[in-house]
Amino acid sequence: DDEPAEQSALVSYRSLQEERQSYTGPNSPVTEQIKSQD
């Protein structure tokens, strides 16, 4: 069943976005990665 994995990925993604906001800044590579996924 892929649904639990999907949900887990979404939760991790949201966590990353929250972490990103408290990250160094908009030029951080993490931000670029998330933007290109979006």
Image (cartoon, helix red, strand yellow):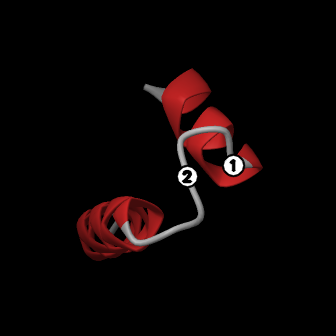
Q: Secondary structure at mark 2?
A: loop
> Residue 15 appears at what percent x and percent y?
34, 74
Q: Which residue is found at the position 36% from the left and 59% from the top?
A: 17
Q: Disc 1 designates what residue?
A: 28
Judged left or right of residue 29, residue 24 is left
Is the residue 26 above or below the residue 37 in the image? below
How many numbered discs, if any?
2
Whether label 1 touches label 2, CB < 8 Å: yes
Identified by mark 2, the residue type is Gly
Is the residue 28 above or below the residue 20 in the image? above
The image quadrant that residue 36 belongs to is: top right
Is the residue 35 above or below the residue 4 in the image? above
The image quadrant that residue 22 belongs to is: bottom left
Judged left or right of residue 3, residue 32 is right
Q: Quadrant of the N terminus?
A: bottom left
Identified by mark 1, the residue type is Ser
Q: Quadrant of the C terminus?
A: top left
Q: Toward the viewer: 23 or 17? A: 23
Q: Disc 2 designates what residue?
A: 25
Mark 1 → mark 2, Cα distance in angstroms: 6 Å
> Residue 37 appears at what percent x and percent y?
54, 30
Q: Toward the viewer: 2 or 18? A: 18
Q: Toward the viewer: 12 or 28? A: 28
